[in-house]
Amino acid sequence: MNIEKKRFYFDCDTGIDDAMALGYLLAEKESVEILGIGTVCGNISAQQGAKNTLDLLRLAGQPSVPVAIGENSYLYYDYVCDVQHIHGENGIGDLVLVPSASHTITESAAELLVRLARENPGKLDIIATGPLTNIAKALQLEPLLPELIGSMTIMGGAALAPGNRTPVAEANIACDPEAAALVFNAMNNIVMVPLDVTMSHTFEEEDRNRLLLSDKPFAKAIGEMLEVYTDFYVDTYGRKTCALHDPVAAVLAVRGLDACIAPKVKVVIDATQGPGRGQTLCDMRGKYLGYPEPLDANCHVVLGTTQNMADLLMHKLLSVG
Ligand code: BDR
Ligand code: CA
């Protein structure tokens, strides 16, 4: 039986955990087709993110996935790279990969997304694991984008959990709250994978060692770059470990809502200049009634998963290439 593959546009700021998400998506090649990848500034510049992505695709033996460089500044603010202590100077833990012979395409990430959405009406799903600037730009180019795409899964936000960039804001939303506000106001089929869930799924040192011992170059490279990422998390968890932010979002985008607990509620982005800037204000007041879906609900907020994400991810990462 021929199962139709899910078609994805992947928007990322590659990024160590973005690299893990990419590896997972490539490993799901029986059920996933990545039609294009766009990079955005965030963990690293959009140009460096594209280079990282192309080099990782080469390492995984899938060098022909189209990669477009996206926005290198936010909607209203300049980009400043300030997360070298988390992702290294080059975004991938200072690991030097063999350069890919492939080049980025000439379209911008927003143009690529719009073209793919028009070519695959209702059939294209978006995964976004960086700031939402490219998606906002795509909405400006094509206001009918929400009707053209199937679903959009984002890693970002914090529903009831604290933020990681400010007391209330998660990094991807905090980088460009105006873009996030535009996206959340325009779309009503978002799946938000917030810190509430991603902080509970980790790779420990024994997991990193399993990757390092792999004879597959992609898995080994992830193990190597995790050295920097897991060092960063010592101050958060008290041990060398790391949160699986972007890969959890990628898994849930592929496996769907059956793989998680995700009430559909109204989410508003704080794009003010006050202390709440970048917060995802999630209306969780339905909690005691089991979250009946309100009429203005725009977003499934993932609060838990039904599977062990670390095990699933390890299994998949070890099979890439
Ligand atoms: C998010 O911020 C970035 O540093 C990670 O790649 C992830 O997308 C977590 O808040
Ligand atoms: Ca990311």
Image (cartoon, rainbow, N blue to C red):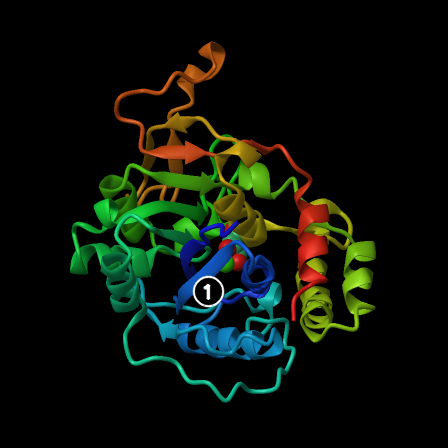
Q: Secondary structure at mark 1?
A: loop
Residue 90 visible somewhere in the drawing:
no
Of 154 and 35, nearer the camera is 35
Q: Which residue is mark 1?
A: 13
Mark 1: few, some, or many residues within 10 Å (few <14, many ≥20)? many
The outermost residue toward the front is 1
Q: Residue at x 39, y 16 (%)?
A: 292
Is label 1 within 8 A of ligand 2 (CB to nearest ligand atom)? Answer: yes
Left or right, residue 287 beside residue 299: right
Report how many numbered discs are placed on residues in the image: 1
Q: Residue at x 57, y 74 (%)?
A: 56
In the figure, 159 relative to 131: above or below?
A: above
Q: Residue 220 location, x and y as percent?
A: 73, 71
Q: Residue at x 46, y 85 (%)?
A: 102
The outermost residue toward the top is 289
Q: Residue 200 location, x and y as percent?
A: 65, 39
Residue 104 visible somewhere in the drawing:
yes
